[in-house]
């Protein structure tokens, strides 16, 4: 039931706008009513074009996100595990973090060309920092007192990692993955604005250039739905490991 | 036999936490160490546990020198320190990792039964009260059947009623398993109620200044004359040990957690 309450506001707004256009209070040329947006979506869907764009965008996200997450996890774990590597790496990475990721675009295009590689790299860079910061922060804030319990029971280093450190950092890590994925969706548009023949970002630009606001809104809507779905999938995949947490257990 | 032999502990900052500390604890004996905060009593316990190394001297358990946490030595911290992602039963069986699963389950069940939490085996730590959580911590320490159980102010965070019931509980467990108990506390009543012997420590540097034997049969009457008398002797020794020091300087670099 509570699940449905979330729909009241957007549905009411959509109906109100639909009515306003129907009864002639608004023109709806630049801001098409929901019926036109859905009609556009439907047209894109039956030709199969929509799915081609979704597939292209999703593939970029997955590749970029995957790459960013692997790099961030390895470097974050390294920086968390040893003070020396943290002292060596962290200042540089923090400095790079201060660079807006979009600023890399010209360089990436020169380095990797205008096709897939530069796009995936941009997404990877965007996903990297929240995950790196998340895992590093999680490792540094592991309760020393709980680690001491492991020492009392003479856990070997691998056992300490498996039985105490990993479960302790998992909640913060999942949060950082979700943040990273959110940024991934942001950067995939930026990447597709750089010039792409397919993808939801291409659909946006195409809609702008051809003056089709319904197509722009249809892609925005698709972005919203896909973003929400991928985030929910990520949360659902992590949930079985986090049932012990108050927040997850009490969620209904 | 647990032997603390001429221990000295100097911290890297130069502070001397313990000086010439000697104890011999018989198997199955209950020894309480009392003293004000910062007298080095927790440091002493951490040294016995092998969590820290002494600067000088050695700790022997049945002829074996303790240099790192030892399988025959259990530890109960001031806080329960349960792992929040494990159930009560998994927490209680945490130290039984090398034991085959059927036996591990059996021993976990037994020890949870002993602490009266068999019904909570599948609960999460967050669902427990403070006293229940500390009982799980005691069960976890006892499950590997240690010869020596060290307790660092284990009941100090609990309310008076829970504390009294847990003290009795601890004695029941001691009856059942007969481990050597070394208990650090600042609660004099707790010390005389539980211990065969109370050692009074004095700070800066930490050392023993008095030893009070309490040769009273158990169960003891918490409010009886005899315990009251013992309590006064401990208090007198503590008072004496405090007066010899200028007050208000008892900083605690050593005893931190």
Image: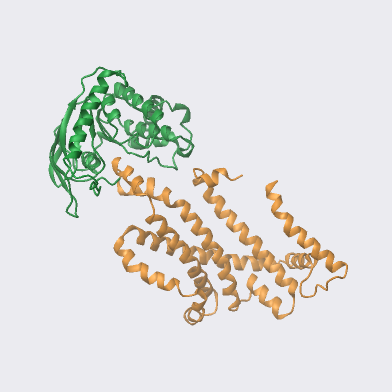
Q: Is residue B26 above or below residue A8?
A: above
Quadrant assignment for the N terminus of chain B = top left
| Residue B239, quarter of the rendered image | top left
Q: Position of residue A115 (x, y in %)?
A: 55, 77
Q: Position of residue B172 (x, y in %)?
A: 33, 22
Q: Is residue B46 above or below residue B228?
A: below
Q: Is residue A201 left or right of residue B78?
A: right
The hue of chain B in the figure is green
Camera-nearest residue between A78 and B231: B231
| Residue B79, quarter of the rendered image | top left
Camera-nearest residue between A9 and B243: B243
| Residue A217, quarter of the rendered image | bottom right
Quadrant assignment for the C terminus of chain B = top left
Which lettered chain is shown in orange? Answer: A
Camera-nearest residue between B224 and B85: B224
Q: Position of residue B25 (x, y in %)?
A: 18, 29
Tell me the residue at 16%/32% (across/down). Answer: B210
Tell me the residue at 31%/45% (across/down). Answer: A148
Tell me the residue at 33%/57% (across/down). Answer: A81
């Amino acid at each position: 039931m509570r699940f449905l309450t979330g729909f009241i506001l957007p549905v009411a707004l959509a109906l109100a706008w639909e009515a306003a256009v129907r009864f002639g209070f608004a023109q709806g040329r630049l801001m098409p009513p929901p019926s036109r947006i859905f009609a556009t979506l439907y047209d894109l869907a039956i030709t199969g074009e929509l799915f081609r764009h979704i597939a292209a965008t999703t593939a970029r996200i997955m590749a970029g996100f995957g790459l960013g997450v692997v790099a961030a996890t390895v470097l974050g774990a390294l920086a968390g595990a040893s003070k020396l590597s943290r002292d060596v790496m962290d200042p540089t990475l923090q400095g790079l973090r201060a660079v807006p990721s979009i600023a890399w675009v010209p360089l990436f295009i020169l380095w990797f060309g205008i096709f897939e590689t530069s796009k995936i790299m941009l997404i990877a860079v965007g996903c990297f920092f929240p995950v790196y910061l998340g895992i590093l922060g999680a490792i540094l804030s592991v309760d020393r007192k709980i680690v001491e319990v492991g020492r009392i029971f003479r856990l070997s280093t691998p056992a300490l990692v498996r039985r105490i450190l990993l479960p302790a950092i998992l909640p913060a890590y999942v949060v950082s993955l979700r943040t990273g994925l959110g940024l991934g969706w942001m950067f995939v548009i930026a990447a597709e604005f750089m010039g792409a023949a397919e993808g939801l970002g291409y659909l946006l630009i195409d809609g702008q250039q051809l003056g089709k606001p319904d197509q722009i809104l249809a892609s925005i809507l698709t972005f919203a739905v896909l973003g929400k779905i991928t985030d929910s999938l990520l949360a659902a995949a992590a949930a079985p490991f986090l049932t012990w947490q108050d927040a997850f257990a009490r969620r209904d | 036999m647990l032997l603390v032999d001429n221990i000295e502990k100097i911290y890297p900052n130069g502070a001397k936490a313990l000086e010439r500390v000697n104890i011999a604890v018989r198997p199955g004996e209950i020894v309480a160490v009392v003293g004000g905060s910062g007298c080095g009593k927790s440091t002493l316990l951490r040294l016995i546990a092998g969590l820290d190394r002494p600067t000088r001297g050695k700790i022997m358990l049945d002829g074996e020198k303790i240099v790192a946490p030892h399988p025959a030595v259990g530890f109960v911290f001031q806080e329960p320190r349960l792992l929040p992602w494990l159930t009560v039963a998994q927490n209680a069986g945490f130290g039984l990792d090398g034991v085959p699963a059927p036996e591990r389950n059996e021993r976990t069940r037994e020890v949870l039964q002993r602490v009266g939490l068999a019904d909570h085996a599948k609960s999460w730590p967050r669902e427990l009260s403070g006293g229940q959580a500390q009982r799980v911590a005691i069960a976890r320490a006892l499950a590997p059947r240690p010869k020596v159980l060290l307790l660092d102010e284990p009941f100090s965070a609990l309310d008076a009623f829970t504390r009294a019931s847990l003290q009795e509980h601890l004695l029941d467990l001691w009856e059942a398993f007969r481990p050597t108990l070394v208990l650090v506390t600042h609660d004099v009543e707790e010390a005389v109620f539980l211990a065969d012997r109370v050692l009074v420590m004095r700070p800066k540097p930490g050392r023993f200044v008095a030893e009070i034997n309490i040769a009273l049969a158990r169960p003891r009457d918490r409010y009886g004359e005899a315990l009251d008398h013992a309590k006064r002797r401990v208090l007198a020794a503590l008072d004496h040990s405090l007066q010899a020091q200028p007050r208000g300087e008892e900083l605690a670099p050593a005893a931190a957690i």
